[in-house]
Image: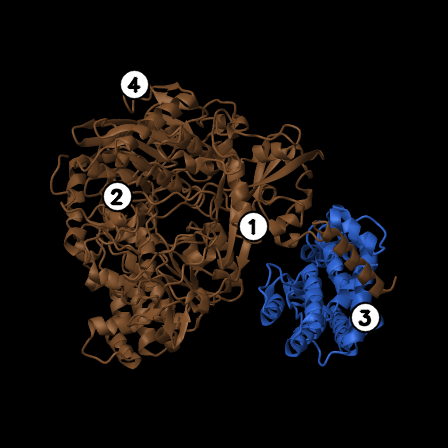
Chain colours: A brown, B blue
Amino acid sequence: MPLENLNDRIRAARAEVEARGETFYPGPSRIHLAAFPPKERWDDWVELDAKAWPKRVERRYTLVPTTCFNCESACGLLAYIDRESLQVRKFEGNPEHPGSRGRNCAKGPATLTQVTDPDRILQPLKRTGPRGSGTWEPVSWDDALDDIAGRVRKAIIEQRQNEVMYHVGRPGEDGFTERILAAWGVDGHNSHTNVCSSNGRAGYQYWMGFDRPSPDFANAKVIVLVSAHLETGHYFNPHAQRIIEARKDGAKLIVFDSRLSNTATHADYWVPSYPGSEPAVLLSVASYLIRHGLYNRDFVRRWWNWRQYLEVEHPEVEPTFENFEQVLRQLYADYTFEFAAREAGVDVEVIEAVAMTVATAGTRLATHNWRSAAAGNEGGWQVSRTIFFLNALMGAVATSGSTFPNAWNKFVPKPIHTPPHPQTWNELTWPVEYPLAMNELSFLLPHFLKEGRGVLDVYFTRVYNPVWTNPDGFSWIEVLTDERVMNLHVALTPTWNETAYFADYVLPMGHAPERHDIHSYETHDGQWIGFRQPVMRALRNRLGQPVADTREVNPGEVWEENEFWIELTWRIDPDGSLGIRRHVESKREPGAKLSVDEYYAYLFEHSVPGLPARAATENLTPLEYMRRYGAFEVSRRVGARYEEEVGGEELQDTVDDRYGRVLTRAPKPASLNIVPVPSPEGDSDGRRPVGVRIDGTVHRGFPTPSGLLEFYSRTLAQWGWPEHAIPTYIKSHVHPDHLGSDEKALISTFRLPVHIHTRSANAKWLDEIAHTNPVWLNTGDAQALGLSTGDLVRVETKIGHFVARAWVTEGIRPGVVACSHHMGRWKIHDDGQRQLMATVDLAHEGTRWGLTRERGVEPYRTSDPDTARIWWTDAGVHQNMTFPVHPDPVSGQHCWHQPVRVRKAEPGDRYGDVVVDTSKSMEAYRAWLAKTRSALQFSPDRTRRPFWLLRPLKPAKTYFKLPETPAPTGASGAD
Amino acid sequence: MELFRALAVVAEPPGPETGRILSLLEIEGEATPSAYAELFAFQLYPYASVYLGSEGMLGGEARDRIAGFWRAIGQVPPTEPDHLAVLLALYARVSELAAGTDDPKGRAGWARARTALLWEHLMSWLPVFLAKLDALAREPYRGWGRVVAQALGAEVESLGAAAALPLHLREAPPFQPGHERVTLLDQVLAPVRSGMILTKTDLARGAREIGVGLRAGERRFVLGAFLDQDAERTLVWLADEAERASRLHADTIEDEAVSRFWVSRAHDTADLLRALTLEGAPHA
């Protein structure tokens, strides 16, 4: 046949196949290990059974998508459900997911081991002895719900809303529980974020309003990471794959890390800076760009609030851009490479090479900091503020290959109900001492309760383990076991954890394939939503067997959270008289309870642009489409939205402030995307900020008070921190100036690549790979201390010590020691996760607490034969308990790095020992509290907090006002 | 250009779609995993760098050049930018862009890219590769190779002759084995230096023709064992193989400059090997 005919024939065949919504070609080439089952074959996918080899035994599967529930990335998974047994056989990547693109890290496939974990909790439990005694009895969901709902209802009726608190670890669906709490009228949302990313967020927020970066790594020319993305970073898998793409395309990678992390091993430039010195180095790079005129002048002139800075801080000079440039040069003149080298302990040549590399990036500079150095140091929020300084100088903001604000790369669909803001302010989470806190002062809850600042009637911990995760865990145990301040503790968790031991109810929640959530994360320059779903429910639906309650298809009595919260809310207000029930009512059947099917059907039909049309091309409803494919790409290449010109319809009766902020009377257009965005205030005449006028044109700008990138934060200056109002360097609490001669800085924030905080001990595959956390010691330091690899070391903090084993390595800089927090899980009774939890004796005399290891991990017999094959005994050492609280006085973030003394273990010390005196914990708490600048003294407008700042659950504006009588402070109260 | 995309799929390990595509191409035979593995994993490695690189191995400067081409046209190079399937699929895409881009300037740019891809990274080695495949492969891969050759021929006819000898060939170092045995083995197994492709099947035949034992192992080891057993006859056999390759190139490569390169490269190799035979066995 002639070639042209062949060509036409294939083209026609392709068109015909693709018109049916099927795949003609096998997708990305299998040569690149990226082949996936074509989606039209997901209903009946045939594979050879690997275990049957060398026999060729075919297995038939139905592939159902869901979303991983281990780290926050929410990568797509495909559950391979055996069509004969209707059991999930494995999880692999979902190629339809725009963030993860079919690829997963080890934690994704290991979901299977979490589902089948023989130690998981399968039914609701109620304690029968004293808290922490380990005696439980099964309880029905009905009884538990009625008891909890009754207590919450009573608290609401008696105006004790602030005694109800929900404390979240791994986030579920964006905004879902915030709305539930808002429906109850409770300001009781408490997140883990202040032990996580608050410092990172704060630095970004003071620049651009948005509190989270979204680097477009794949298109970058130069990547600067103060983090460990390729190994263990925040959006590990989606980011890592894009960083690798950029590297293949010739991008240069610069990594700041005191440790030789896996990421650092991939770097073109590894900057092993001393912990906390990162801003000094970043400012020296900025200074180089400024001194040599290598920055994007026009971008800086148009988009920085330099005029405001000059007028407020330098009224003596005329506010021209040229004068600002001169001031800028002077401001950063002292940040020389030599200065940075002294602070960081890194060669001048390395820093100079980094600066010269950054200078070549143009607008393709992707930088990122999330936890890492920001989370480790007092003033760590200047890490993200100074790293973004480089983007702001280069004009590398929301351009291809640069860093975007997260909200433009994220889509949160508007839900079926939106309850109003709570009419209350919770001082236990948002105290007056921290008016600029990025998030709730969650890790100070025990200290506040001990001081008598309040009590909790109903406290939910939800997939959260503060006893193990937070610093000063013994103080948590003290308050969790004190029924005077903690009336009822409800632990919502898929698996046992150290906090659940001290609960009154333990309620089993589902893993990734057993629950609903929608997610959207800023993985690249695009917007997507991913759908987590109970895969057996989706399968039953496909088989024509509708499921009304997810418990029908989940293991045991495991539930999913959305149905739980809807049910609980319904029972709090069964007759609707409190005005709460309406927020969980059906719209299709008024007066009936909202089902999760209706909830998601509404959301996908009404709030996700393009989804209904896309679903219709396959004769599916939007919900059916999401149940079938698990993800939808809302948009790609979003671009620089701040440059967008504001249309005339939005410009009604406008006024400009003196710096070009444009205020309008036109109402804000409705948006289907309800991603959290800061809310700069309008004027007293009712106008709202709509944009910013630059060179005569009104652009959308940024959600900052000025509408511009805020080189100068008027907010920081007005709320008591004028010395930190511009990007600057704050010496960390572990700066050598603050350490004794025999002290070192301990880094504890780094992850192990295959684990995820408190949540993966129930994954046997992951446990087998990683089950220890030695103390990293530089060779020279080890020699001076007389230590070798494997020796027991005692690491002393300000409140106690722990005993671990040394690992002597050149992979960490001298003067710094490191120990990953991903280990040291423990249990005090038989209940617990036996694959990676040591059995310990927990004892105390007064405020002196000790944790002593009785047994390590051992093999044991269960329905899973692998548990009898466990060969490891180690479970690591729990170090966080020995850390006093270090709340950053500005952001409120716990600053994780510790000044420590390291020495050989003493006779009698045993591996895994943890000793703490909680009276010293309270001293440390007070010492750090004394660093704060309270709203009572520094609020410029007698409010508790700048209204424009983000807050996960925002009370009505009137509750921002400070009380007439001062709120209680840490100056009084009992321990 | 759908044809090139379909041909690319056949160069990948077979899946359910391979049969459908072969049927559309009217090629007989079943693409089984074992047939695919025998041809592409054990005999003719489907990577340009193996045939264009001075080491005769995967990767190296030849692959870098091809990756550079991907970058030059604004694409991120895939993991294996020089795999035959990837190159054929890229050719399909570039040809579509050359035909379908609205902007005349952009269209001209894509047309240049298409010509460069054809001559620099496909026609520089595929005629040699496909001729060997034709002699070696069974159906359906033999039929597939013929359609690939036919399709490339049509492209050459449509786009015209190359302006210059492809850079891979211009930069290829000559066959200069000297007296080091390891150098001889390296160079004789590097097609762009020796002008010939020696497959495992060729070596099995060589064992019979020379009268030496065939040891199991990779080609370098097998050939080394030949030299251990009878260096003189092995060198003569290799010279004859090179001469045979030279004649084959003259018969099968249509472009004059490319043909001249491969013909003379193989012919020179034959001469040098004969000279070596006279000088004695290479040193171990």
Gap in angstroms between the C-alphas marked 3 and 4: 85 Å
Is the Cβ of the residue at disc 1 closer than 8 Å to that at disc 3?
Answer: no
Quick one: A341 or A111, which is closer to the camera? A111
Residue A733 drawn at (x, y percent): 21, 53
Share a chain, discs 3 and 4? no
Name the chain under label 2. Answer: A
Q: Name the residue under label 4.
A: A129
**B104 vs A609: above or below:** below
Q: What residue type is labelled 1?
A: Phe
Is A678 placed above or below A310 here? above
- In the image, is residue A153 above or below residue A673? above
**Label 2 vs label 3, nearer the camera:** 2
Label 1 vs label 3, nearer the camera:
1
- Residue B236 as seen in the image, left or right of residue A445: right
Q: What residue type is labelled 3?
A: Ala
**Element type at marker 4?**
loop
